[in-house]
Image (cartoon, rainbow, N blue to C red):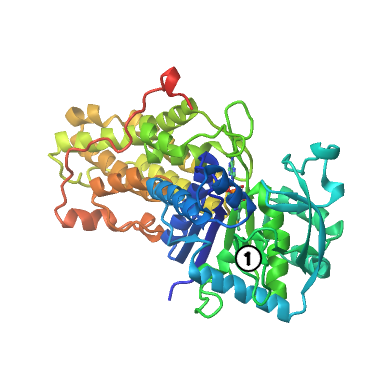
């Protein structure tokens, strides 16, 4: 049976509408999930919404509706966005799902049985926006103006709560990071987390009594779990904890943003160690997508870009390609409608799309759609195929290492090589002077285009899928890229190319009012 691969996004707070940052995270995870499926892995891909906590309760109150009704409505916008963006999730989890309550209560009980939970009084600073407790020493500002390290307001809270013995896990966590250098990536995030843990860990308040919108603490009336305890547990719920087969656990990759690395790389492994559950293999903290002026977009600040509007304007694939190509994975990137159009036109329409369109329409017109014959080969043909093989392998190895934008750069080198080849070989000129040679050139191009289309499929599934349909190429996994026999088998079926319509249409630059 295929080897399991479990990838998750963060589950998103649906206290506002989804923004381009949420879309970015889902797309990146989707690219990796599709890529791992192509590699033959049995992928479980989970995304969803994080619906408990004070932030949600307050947002519902501000709208004057019941929290559950608010959560239902807002969560549906995230699911709709995932569907619009072609996110190939296996499960869209909601933390109000009944099996998630069971999993959260089970991990709680396991931590209690380990002796890691105790009742005490919490007095300290809380940021509702981050749903996080902070030590005094982490704050900036004075009096009522105090801010968390994320720059969000904090308020003093005092209540009786359950505590988790996080302090006990300082050394085990440091040992974990030392033994698994890839547990936290990229390296800059790993260093931050190690400094934080080396500085000492205070026990963590893990229940709340001042509101009731959460998972009830088993056997402790009036307490609901701190939202991050239940939120992190979503990853186990998806794997079938506590009584499912857990075949996909431990997770291979928790893909999350840089602002929540501490929760995933400190609290989460500590909870799991306490509960006696194996640890995920890695946590990757991606960068943030910033507005064009470099400012942070956030629901609470209100300067968010609606990803649905972008998809309506430019299509799914150009937006997906832009996000993966222009934002170096792991770093912040900025974003504008012009940049999407410029990138999609340069790489997809003018380079790859145009190559495919020129080749296929030439075949449709001049060979009546028949598969070009072997013709007369030239060393340039084998050289081009070799360059394309190297480009596809470059994408594959970069993607396996989560270097997504570098993978696309490698892929583009293959596209450029094809465009150079078509210009130098000039099949349109050969049509009259050397039809034998023309057939060999077209045949080489069809082979190259098929390989490049399969390699790029995880990033632009709709357009690359359409192109592969035009080519009649059914097998689309990694093994198919290197399948030299495909062409001749396809000839044997008597396949004919239809007159193609552009898989990667050119986009118009936005008018001023349509700017994001
Ligand atoms: O933190 N660019 O939810 P959230 C890229 N519910 N990514 C961004 C971003 C941006 N501008 N803004 C936010 C939460 N994100 C918790 C997670 S997981 C068990 C619980 C990312 O809706 C952010 O980094 O505030 C996070 O990974 C995700 O979107 C959800 O953020």
**Observer able to see residue 407:** no
- Which sits in the foreground, 135 or 84? 135
Where on the picture, by quarter, is residue 148?
top right
Instruction: Give the residue drawn at x 41%, y 22%.
Output: 509
- Which sits in the foreground, 290 or 30? 290
**Location of residue 2 in the rendering, given as x and y in whole percent from the top left corner:** 44, 72
**Location of residue 40 in the rendering, given as x and y in whole percent from the top left corner:** 43, 65
Instruction: Give the residue drawn at x 12%, y 39%.
Output: 368
Position above or below: 44 against 342: below
Identify the element where label 1 is drawn.
loop
**Observer able to see residue 246:** yes
Quadrant where the N terminus sits is bottom left
Q: Which residue is mark 1?
A: 281
The answer to whether 124 appears left or right of 302 in the picture is right
**Location of residue 122 in the rendering, given as x and y in whole percent from the top left corner:** 81, 60
- Which sits in the foreground, 100 or 24? 100
Instruction: Give the residue drawn at x 72%, y 62%.
Output: 267
Toward the front, the furthest residue is 64
């Amino acid at each position: 049976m295929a080897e399991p691969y479990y990838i998750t996004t963060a589950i998103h707070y649906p206290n506002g509408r989804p923004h381009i940052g949420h879309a970015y995270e889902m797309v990146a995870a989707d690219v990796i999930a599709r890529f791992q499926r192509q590699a033959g892995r049995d992928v479980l891909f989970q995304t969803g919404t994080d619906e408990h906590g004070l932030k949600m309760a307050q947002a519902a109150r501000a709208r004057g509706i019941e929290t559950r009704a608010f959560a239902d409505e807002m969560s549906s916008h995230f699911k709709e966005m995932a569907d619009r963006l072609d996110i190939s999730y296996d499960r869209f989890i909601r933390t109000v799902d009944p099996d998630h309550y069971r999993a959260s209560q089970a991990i709680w009980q396991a931590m209690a049985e380990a002796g890691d939970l105790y009742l005490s009084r919490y007095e300290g600073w809380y940021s509702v926006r981050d749903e996080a407790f902070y030590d005094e020493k982490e704050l900036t500002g004075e009096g009522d103006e105090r801010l968390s390290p994320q720059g969000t307001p904090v308020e003093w809270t005092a209540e009786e709560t359950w505590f988790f013995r996080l302090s006990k896990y300082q050394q085990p966590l440091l040992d974990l990071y030392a033994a698994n250098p890839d547990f936290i990536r990229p390296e800059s995030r790993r260093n931050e987390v190690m400094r934080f843990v080396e500085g000492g860990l205070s026990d963590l308040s893990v229940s709340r009594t001042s509101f009731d919108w959460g998972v009830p603490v088993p056997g402790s009336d009036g307490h609901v779990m701190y939202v991050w305890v239940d939120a992190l547990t979503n990853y186990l719920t998806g794997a079938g904890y506590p009584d499912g087969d857990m075949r996909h656990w431990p997770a291979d990759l928790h893909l999350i943003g840089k602002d929540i690395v501490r929760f995933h790389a400190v609290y989460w492994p500590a909870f799991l160690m306490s509960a006696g559950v194996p640890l995920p293999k890695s946590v990757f903290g991606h960068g943030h997508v910033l507005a064009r002026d470099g400012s942070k977009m956030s629901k609470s600040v209100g300067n968010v870009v609606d990803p649905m509007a972008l998809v309506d304007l430019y299509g799914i694939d150009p937006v997906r390609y832009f996000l993966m190509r222009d934002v170096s994975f792991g770093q912040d990137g900025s974003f504008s409608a012009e940049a999407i159009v410029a990138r999609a036109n340069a790489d997809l329409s003018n380079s790859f799309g145009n190559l495919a369109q020129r080749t296929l329409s030439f075949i449709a017109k001049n060979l009546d759609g028949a598969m070009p014959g072997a013709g007369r080969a030239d060393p340039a043909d084998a050289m081009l195929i070799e360059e394309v093989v190297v480009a596809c392998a470059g994408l594959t190895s970069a993607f396996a290492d989560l270097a997504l934008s570098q993978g696309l750069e490698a892929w583009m080198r293959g596209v450029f090589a094809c465009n150079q080849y078509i210009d130098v070989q000039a099949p349109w000129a050969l049509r009259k002077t050397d039809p034998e040679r023309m057939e060999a050139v077209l045949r080489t191009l069809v082979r190259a285009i098929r390989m490049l289309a399969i390699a790029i499929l995880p990033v632009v599934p709709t357009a690359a899928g359409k192109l592969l349909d035009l080519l009649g190429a059914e097998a689309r996994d990694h093994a198919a890229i290197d399948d030299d026999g495909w062409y001749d088998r396809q000839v044997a079926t008597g396949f004919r190319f239809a007159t193609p319509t552009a898989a990667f249409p050119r986009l118009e630059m936005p008018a001023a009012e349509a700017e994001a």
